[in-house]
Image (cartoon, rainbow, N blue to C red):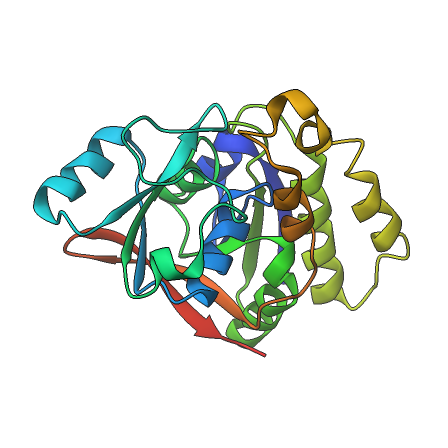
Amino acid sequence: MDIQILQLLDGAQQARGLTVIIDVLRAFSLECYLTDRGAAEIRPVRTLEEAFAWRERDPAVLLVGERGGAKCEGFDFGNSPSGIPAEAVRGRRIIHTTSAGTQGLTQAVHAEERIAGSLVNAAAVAAYIRARKPETVSLVCMGNAGVREAPEDLLCAEYIRSLLLGTPLPDMDARTQALRWHGGEHFFNPDTQEIYPEPDFWLCVKRDLFPFVLRAVTDESGLRMEKVVTI
């Protein structure tokens, strides 16, 4: 198995084989939490225009996402796992757009298969890959807005690779804790709590919490995230 770690939007466009688009803080951690809270469907889209077009077709959808970290104007919720209660999403169709994660999913056009990755389901991602036995695996770290590398996404990629190779990362716990000061420090800034609440950080750095992956499948309406239980 050829495992490569790629970075940012360029990496998504270069990805081949079974591709894991990684966004720890916060897009794909959030999608796992929304799935666990009973969302009926999650559909990632690239642009705000696509999201609002969904609302025109289906007024019952929930629009979820961010630009510059903040909730998009006219959306129901931002990109915050601590800010979206289960009762708001249970049984609902979610239209999700972000600055990095959903952009990577939509731009990984050469991938044979696309799944979303984060720390909260990293072990499930590795189990899925092992079961699929692909020749090529691309682990794409989406970073900040898809243009600046982020340590949390690289850590997640290295952790998934270590699980696939059977070579544990001895400093995994220490590196995860260090994200509080290097990568996630904005979640601890009193002046940015409205956009980056501290509880989001702790929810997103939980490891191996969910036993499923979210696989991007294409249907007549676009991309849809499909839950696949792996462990």
27 with respect to 61 (left or right): right
Estimate the x, y position of residue 201 in percent, counting from the top left.
66, 43
Determine the residue positioned at 56% across, 67% down: 129
Image quadrant holding the C terminus, namely bottom right
Determine the residue positioned at 83% across, 63% down: 168
Image quadrant holding the N terminus, namely bottom right
Position of residue 122 relative to residue 143, above or below, is below
Estimate the x, y position of residue 133 in percent, counting from the top left.
55, 72
> Which residue is nearer to you in this view: 75 or 47?
75
Q: Which quadrant holds residue 67?
A: top left
Q: Which quadrant holds residue 49?
A: top left
185 with respect to 139 (left or right): right
Determine the residue positioned at 85% across, 54% down: 173
Determine the residue positioned at 54% across, 48% down: 82
> Which residue is nearer to you in this view: 136 or 206?
206
Estimate the x, y position of residue 102 in percent, counting from the top left.
41, 41
